[in-house]
Image (cartoon, rainbow, N blue to C red):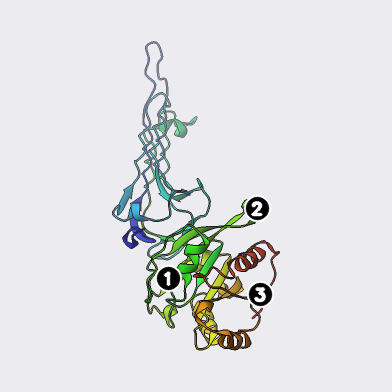
Amino acid sequence: MASSNFIDYVKINCRSGAGGAGSVHFRREKFVDKGGPDGGDGGRGGHIILRGNAQLWTLLHLKYQKHIKADPGKAGEGGRRTGAQGKDVIIEVPLGTIARHAESNEQLAEITEDKQELILLPGGRGGLGNDHFKSSTKQTPQYAQPGEAGQEAWIILELKLLADVGLVGFPNAGKSTLLSVMSAAKPEIADYPFTTLVPNLGVVAYRDYKSFVMADIPGIIEGAAQGKGLGLRFLRHIERNAILLFVVPATSEDVAAEYQTLLNELEQFNLELLDKRRLLAISKIDLIGEEEMAQVRKNLPPAIQAVFISAIRQEGLQELKDAIWHQLTKPEEAITD
């Protein structure tokens, strides 16, 4: 998919509908003298609602829709007839979308399931008709409640991709190639940094018709947590992954140091990322000889399972799938560095 079609951040102005006014009305019929108040209530204003849609994976459809407004409720009528409710506006978003208030940064909603609905901004309540205000001492109330005003706010919608496995590594580490051979995804692949400019998702087939979802996140560089390179824009997608698969090429000068640099960037961005389960894939083993391979094995970082792979020769891929599946299905336990 073209990079311009992947939109993971939009800012929109939302306004829920105002409630309808209550009615001031008195029953007037032939042969019925002083029938009394019978003004109906106003209808509720329309809600602004977020709904999850598993068929969407981008916020592109909202990019040019800056103002979203729900209808107001109708006023009440005589005969205790309640006004019609304002029509709700439903905003469909991909799974993994978070809604935040633009000014306070308060999180208002989080959509993680298909067809899940959450009210983002409630519509105003309808006013009570004069029928509610009658009493033994006030039998002809000449007033009713106005409808409650709707709510208006600038809302930030931010997408964080939902995937079982997130690929983490420096640019040109072989993440896109790995995703392309393990799944049906077709990310752009070339021998230069930042080939991947948008996250790519792929479904990886496993044994006995099982599968898991893998996400290729654009490459991290040192200082990404401070906004360097592609910076914070894509680091947030890693927050939703169950497992972090670090990809470091066997041709790296120091595999352990490169892995530690990646960890440091994740820690600066969000300390909770260090609590996620991790695996290490040593990629591009087809580019080194036996002596270099022995040296890499000798200097592996401690306390993390490492799998040696070659996406080009498709070596070690089944072992990597087994390791990923084991991590996905094993019981929760503390992760130690």
Q: Percent position (x, y) of residue 107?
A: 47, 61
Q: Which amino acid does label 2 sit on?
A: Asp
On residue 218, the disc is 1
| 43 relative to 223, above or below | above
- Circle 1 packing at 10 Å, graded few (<14), some (14-19), many (20+), is many
Q: Determine the residue positioned at 70% across, 69% down.
A: 333
Q: Which of 73 and 162 is in front in this view?
A: 162
Q: Which of 282 and 111 is in front in this view?
A: 282
On residue 335, the disc is 3
Q: Indicate the secondary structure of the residue bearing disc 2.
A: helix
C-alpha separation, residue under disc 2 versus residue under disc 1: 31 Å
* Label 2 or label 1, whichever comes before in sequence order: 2
Q: Percent position (x, y) of residue 97?
A: 46, 57
C-alpha separation, residue under disc 3 versus residue under disc 1: 25 Å
* Label 2 or label 3, whichever comes before in sequence order: 2
Q: Which of marks 3 and 1 is in front?
A: 1
Q: Percent position (x, y) of residue 294?
A: 61, 86
Q: Percent position (x, y) of residue 56?
A: 43, 51
Q: Determine the residue positioned at 52% across, 70% down.
A: 313
Q: Indicate the secondary structure of the residue bearing disc 1.
A: loop
On residue 273, the disc is none
| 21 relative to 230, above or below | above
Residue at image mark 2 = 208
Q: Which amino acid does label 3 sit on?
A: Ile
Screen quadrant of the N terminus:
bottom left
Residue 36 quadrant:
top left
Screen quadrant of the C terminus:
bottom right
Residue 280 quadrant:
bottom right
